[in-house]
Image: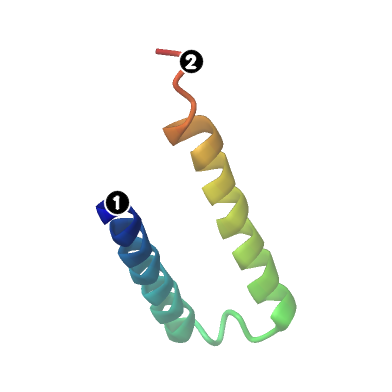
Amino acid sequence: MDKTNEALEETGTKTEVLKKFLDKREAFFDRPEKLVCFLLGVLFGKIESIHFGVFNTHHL
């Protein structure tokens, strides 16, 4: 159960960091299309890191 709580806290922290990042760069994300492209890039980066990083242990 501790790992679950740690994961939730980490996710919350990452969400706060992302919100701060977006707030500081409002001019860059002035159109919804730009924000969507950025968030899709973040999502694909996360999926790629999970796929090739944490869970990909067959190369060991």
Work out whether residue 6 or residue 2 is closer to the camera in this orientation and state it.
2
Of the residues shown, which amino acid type is indicated by label 2? His
For label 2, the crowd category at 10 Å Cα-Cα, with few meaning under 14, some 14 to 19 and many 20 or more, is few
Q: Quadrant of the C terminus?
A: top left
Q: Which percent across, then down, holds residue 14? A: 38, 66
For label 1, the crowd category at 10 Å Cα-Cα, with few meaning under 14, some 14 to 19 and many 20 or more, is few
Q: Which residue is mark 1?
A: 3
Toward the right, the furthest residue is 33
Q: Which residue is mark 2?
A: 58
Toward the left, the furthest residue is 2
Structural distance between the alpha carbons of marks 1 and 2? 24 Å
Q: In this image, 23 relative to 28: left or right? A: left
Work out whether residue 4 or residue 14 is closer to the camera in this orientation and state it.
4
For the residues bearing labels 1 and 2, Cβ distance under 8 angstroms? no
Q: In this image, 1 relative to 58: left or right? A: left
Q: Which percent across, then down, holds residue 47? A: 58, 45
**In the image, what residue occupies the spot 37% across and 70% down?**
12
**In the image, what residue occupies the spot 57% across and 80% down?**
28
> How is this picture coloured?
rainbow
Between disc 1 and disc 2, the foreground one is: 1
Work out whether residue 41 or residue 13 is closer to the camera in this orientation and state it.
13
